[in-house]
Image: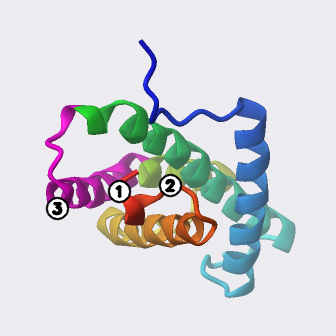
Amino acid sequence: MGNSEKNTESFVHTVIRTIITTTIIAAILYGVHVFPSSGKSKLVLFEMIWSAVFCIVFCGHWLELLFINRIKFYLPQNMLSLYFIRIVYWFLCAMPLFFAANLIADLFSPQTAQMGRWWMLGFFYIGIQLLMHAIMQVRFKKSFYNGVY
């Protein structure tokens, strides 16, 4: 029995969209000097930023699909509860994403400074999700703002 709300997208489309999104975000983060260079060349610094951002965007996509296609159907259907649970879910999803991105950044240099506190990334990740869902809302697609999609 199929689920009419299930979100499906081809893997190739997901990878292409993720690469484009990651490149834009990494260029912005590189341009505003969010990550310290620590003596790395510009190319190595950009590669480190790109890899960490790719990890967050790509893995975050699959965590979103897990919520949309599986978890939300086991939750109470009260809209306020769903909004609250979704925001808490985003915050909790930031933990494994943070540790994975930190691991990737450490691969470029063992002396890489920590990317920050995981809970700070949790709030930042919530902001990212709200922004991405606002873009989907403007494009008249299903989003957090029109029914906790």
Residue 29 lies, with reference to residue 64, above or below; the image says below
Regarding mark 2 in the picture, which secondary structure is present there? loop
- Left or right: 142, with 23 as reference point: left
Residue most extreme to the top: 1
Image location (x, y in percent) of residue 48: 70, 60
- Crowding at dot 1, Cα within 10 Å, few <14 / some 14-19 / many 20+, comes out as few
Residue 49 lies, with reference to residue 64, above or below; the image says below
- Left or right: 16, with 63 as reference point: right
Regarding mark 1 in the picture, which secondary structure is present there? loop
CA distance separating discs 3 and 1: 10 Å
Residue 106, visible in the rendered structure: no
Most common secondary structure along the magenta stretch: helix
Regarding mark 3 in the picture, which secondary structure is present there? helix
The answer to if 48 sits in the magenta stretch is no
Q: Quadrant of the N terminus?
A: top left
CA distance separating discs 3 and 2: 17 Å
Location of residue 50 (image quadrant): bottom right
Image location (x, y in percent) of residue 95: 35, 52
Picture disc at residue 82: none
Residue drawn at (61%, 46%), measured in percent from left and top? Answer: 58
Q: Amino acid at mark 1?
A: Gly
Q: Which badge, 1 or 2, comes first in the chain's sequence? A: 2
Residue drawn at (30%, 66%), measured in percent from left and top? Answer: 119
Residue 120 lies, with reference to residue 140, above or below; the image says below
- Left or right: 40, with 139 as reference point: right
Q: Do tag 1 and tag 2 residues touch (Cβ < 8 Å)?
A: yes
Image location (x, y in percent) of residue 109: 65, 57
Please name the residue that numbered disc 3 is placed on.
80
Please name the residue that numbered disc 2 is placed on.
142
The answer to if 88 sits in the magenta stretch is yes
Magenta extent: 74-96
Q: Amino acid at mark 2?
A: Lys
